[in-house]
């Protein structure tokens, strides 16, 4: 897949259901990640991802192929007060964040996750924030190297536990 064939834009309401299904598919297939039975509220959030766009300062971005296929998605927050995680991240000032990055397994390795991440970085800069905050887990470690190549650094002050699941914070300082 050519990089130029991927379009990043705000998701349309008609796409919310398909994006929710994609998120559930991706997260439920992560080896060792809590199941729908173990964390039903989390999967309900994924399934109904369009609802998150009702929050202020919140956008659901999607990666679309030229033929309109949904390749991935991410939720961007221009104000961390609406980020919706545990821990200290929601009290960070002059910061943006993104959560729930997912790429269709059939399109991994084609730069879709990177394009979604770069779109969030660009939005954070345009919002004149000084940092971008994200969280990840051990089960998503494959993405950590991508985040680090983009300049994100581990920030233990942002770590928290989601039930029995350790969640790790990352921070990108923006110039």
Image (cartoon, helix red, strand yellow):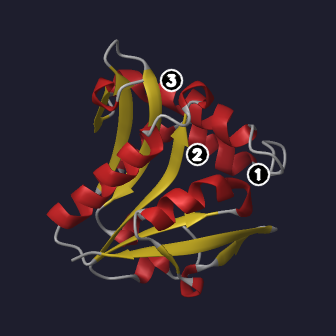
Q: CA distance from mark 3 to mark 2?
A: 14 Å
Q: State the residue at coordinates (23%, 74%).
A: 129
Q: Which mark is residue 39?
A: 1
Disc 1, SS: loop
Pointer 1 with pointer 2, Cβ within 8 A: no
Q: Earlier in the sequence, mark 1 or mark 2?
A: 1
Whether residue 30 is visible: yes
- Residue 54's place in the image compared with 2, above or below, is below
Q: Residues within 10 Å of mark 2 (few under 14, many from 20)?
A: some
Q: CA distance from mark 1 to mark 2?
A: 10 Å
Location of the N terminus (image quadrant): top left
166 to the left or right of 110: right
Residue 11 placement: quadrant: top left
Q: Which residue is mark 3?
A: 18
Residue 125 placement (x, y as % from top left): 20, 66
Q: Which residue is mark 2?
A: 45
- Residue 8's place in the image compared with 81, above or below, is above
Q: Residues within 10 Å of mark 3 (few under 14, many from 20)?
A: some
């Amino acid at each position: 897949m050519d990089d130029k064939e991927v379009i990043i834009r705000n998701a349309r309401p008609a796409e919310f259901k398909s994006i929710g299904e994609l998120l559930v598919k991706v997260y439920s297939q992560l080896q060792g990640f809590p199941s729908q039975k173990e964390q039903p509220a989390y999967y309900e959030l994924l399934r109904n991802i369009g609802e998150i766009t009702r929050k202020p300062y919140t956008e659901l971005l999607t990666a679309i192929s030229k033929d309109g296929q949904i390749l991935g998605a991410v939720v961007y927050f221009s104000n961390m007060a609406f980020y919706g995680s545990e821990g200290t991240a929601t009290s960070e000032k002059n910061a943006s964040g993104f959560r729930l990055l997912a790429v269709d397994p059939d399109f991994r390795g084609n730069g879709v996750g990177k394009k979604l991440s770069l779109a969030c970085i660009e939005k954070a800069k345009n919002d004149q924030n000084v940092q971008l905050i994200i969280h990840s887990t051990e089960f998503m470690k494959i993405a950590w190297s991508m985040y680090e190549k983009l300049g994100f650094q581990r920030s233990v002050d942002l770590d928290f536990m989601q039930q029995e699941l350790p969640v790790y914070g990352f921070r990108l300082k923006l110039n």
